[in-house]
Amino acid sequence: MTCRENCYVTHLESAIDGTKLPHDRIQTLHEGRPLWVRYDLDAIKANLTPATIFQREPTLWRYRELLPLPPGAMPVSLGEGMTPVLPAVRLGETIGAPHLWIKDESQLPTGSFKSRGLCMAITMAKHFGVKRVAIPTAGNAGGAMAAYAARAGMEAFVFMPKDTPVINQAECALAGAKTFLVNGLINDCGAIVRNGVDTMNWFDLSTLKEPYRIEGKKTMGLELAEQFGYDLPDVIVYPTGGGTGLIGMWKAFNELRKLGWLQTATMPKMVAVQSDGCAPIPRAFDAGERFATPWENAATCASGLRVPGAVGDFMILDAIRESGGWAVAVEEDKIVSAMQHAVKTEGISICPEAAACTLAIEKLRSDNRMKRSDRVVLFNTGAASKYLETIPRDLPIIDDPSAIDYAKLFAR
Amino acid sequence: MTCRENCYVTHLESAIDGTKLPHDRIQTLHEGRPLWVRYDLDAIKANLTPATIFQREPTLWRYRELLPLPPGAMPVSLGEGMTPVLPAVRLGETIGAPHLWIKDESQLPTGSFKSRGLCMAITMAKHFGVKRVAIPTAGNAGGAMAAYAARAGMEAFVFMPKDTPVINQAECALAGAKTFLVNGLINDCGAIVRNGVDTMNWFDLSTLKEPYRIEGKKTMGLELAEQFGYDLPDVIVYPTGGGTGLIGMWKAFNELRKLGWLQTATMPKMVAVQSDGCAPIPRAFDAGERFATPWENAATCASGLRVPGAVGDFMILDAIRESGGWAVAVEEDKIVSAMQHAVKTEGISICPEAAACTLAIEKLRSDNRMKRSDRVVLFNTGAASKYLETIPRDLPIIDDPSAIDYAKLFAR
């Protein structure tokens, strides 16, 4: 069987009720809920092997058969993908999990994991002829969207709370996006985008409001599987805002299982981490609920975790429970020192969101939900240097460089 | 012939007079001038092929035989290397060079090309038992050094002019380096490091003051060659501060030529780009001199180009002339708008130094030194988002998100 013209995608499917929708046209939500992209996995199994993928270029497009873009159509690419999985034994020892790896998503275009999802969303939007896109963002998504929109030659609108980190503001403006600071939270920004769809004729790229960001984020799971020789780790610890990455990885692992590529029968436990300054998912998880009540007065220095209500809440909670994992809220006031500790210990540019994950690991180890022998992968979703406001710095000044007192320097 | 215990390195060699020095111990300068690392290229030729390299992991360590670390010794790694080469046809069209590619070094650990050199320097320093390192820096080198020193478990000291971009300051501090702001320029910082060597017992990691940063930067050339199928481009345009990358790439191309791997007889023209706010290399080039007089009152928004005097000046100028290339000074006051234009046009996170290169290409095309048909590669040496002070942003604020006037937004 050869690859058909519209590739291996068979249809889109409502995540809430399984309704099938065609994939040959632009789609958004179905009755307010997100869509899955479904593939003919039997056909992929017959045509593709891990060995073939191994020979390809180190970008996320090496998994093309498992992605939605039809063959022959051009990706909108900035060279994204195949981020390294770095051993972090020293850091792991300090938090009770010495078999720790960090998948370093800071080494992607625009310095964050948002590139994966927005690369795919913009690629598909362009494929369907979209000329203008808009997004609400409180962090790295805006910069990624602006960059890929520029790469695609699209007009872009970004709406962000006015207290969004300055670097996120600057990168959107620099990439030519029409960027607006909003006196409000991300849900206010979301409303601006949603309400403008008809008047402005833009396509809404909000988290999960179109089906393809998940497919981009899915490549975190595909890469991780390949990098672990398809012998998946025991636990995956993931900082969760909108949760697309966690949802996408879980989808990836299930697709790989159906392809028969996984080396073991057990799947990794998925752990969603939030700050106790904004913890709707842990609250719903602990209460045994499938949907999460929006969090009031959301506040955290980890801007990517400041998502009071996620449209894919049930998809996150389903994935965690299916995997036997947990949702964990960590103490907001420990995040900055955890970030300093992690960067200093491993040299990896660990962002506040990933630092929260180190606190979650400590917690899961202290109550023995995780074992010391577990192989654990933590996702570093962005570069620490993008969180300028969060990095403590009060550096000593040398006023007269010709009169250095080295003994004094040394004593510091 | 098998790989020998100390690998393929045969010796170190003074760049100024060819004096041979042993490579089995720590080395710095020879009579104030840098050292080359020399290899037994015949032995490498007999043992290594491009096909073997192609099968390896996408990091710069895939070129291990052409690097100085002995086999079996462990690299200090953050997963660096194999940055993408992105076509930039649209940008190229606007500057008269449509066959333009950008090698995007912003997708490296710490968001800049400095990772390559400092990865190698720290790896070798650790191999030789160094416990404490120091560096003067006016930009990205400090952050890279701090990160790799942390990864290696070394103590690190960083000295930077107090007007160094804030993100560069923050990343050093975050990685645990003892970071000092100096009331002076980078040469003042250099003196602090140099004068402290005995008292502080630190190893001086200044540009070219140890032989291995060149070898790390060399991998830009090795990767580029592999990514172009060993059919090198016609012109390489490189923003030049200390010039290690240009020197390293030229060394790489010559080594590849001796290995017989190159597909064409002609070598690329190497173009060194500086700002007219600090242009010692173009001045020396135009005057036909081998050494560059230090630039007075150096000033440029492209912090990586603010190097008034480079210890490897003659190595840079030799490489440019051997290649038939040029040194070009561009107008300082055009750099910021060139950066905005480039990022907006391609979506790539182009830093001020790389933006200067687009101006240089325009210049070389306008006087026909470069042909329209030339295949040109430009190096984007770092992420634009690290240059917060340089990015124009004066974003409109939406005070009342519930009362949006879309027509007004649209009119902007």
Image (cartoon, coloured by chain):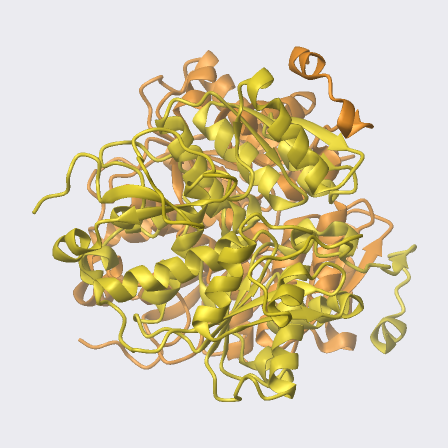
Chain colours: A orange, B yellow
Residue A173 image position (x, y, % from top left) = 75, 62
The number of numbered badges drawn on the structure is 0
Identity of the residue furthest to the left in this view: B1
Q: Is residue A130 above or below residue A293?
A: below
Q: Is residue A335 above or below residue A302?
A: above
Quadrant where the image shows the C terminus of chain B: bottom right
Of B374 and A6, nearer the camera is B374
Q: Is residue B7 above or below residue A282?
A: below
Of B395 and B88, nearer the camera is B88
Of B66 and A26, nearer the camera is B66
Left or right relative to A320: residue B155: right
Residue at 65% x, 87% y: name it. Answer: B366
Residue A104 image position (x, y, % from top left) = 47, 42
Residue A122 found in image quarter: bottom right
Visible residue check, residue A294: no
Residue A273 image position (x, y, % from top left) = 55, 32
Left or right relative to B45: residue A210: right
Visible residue check, residue B23: yes
Left or right relative to A362: residue B128: left
Residue at 68% x, 17% y: name it. Answer: A406
Residue A382 image position (x, y, % from top left) = 57, 44
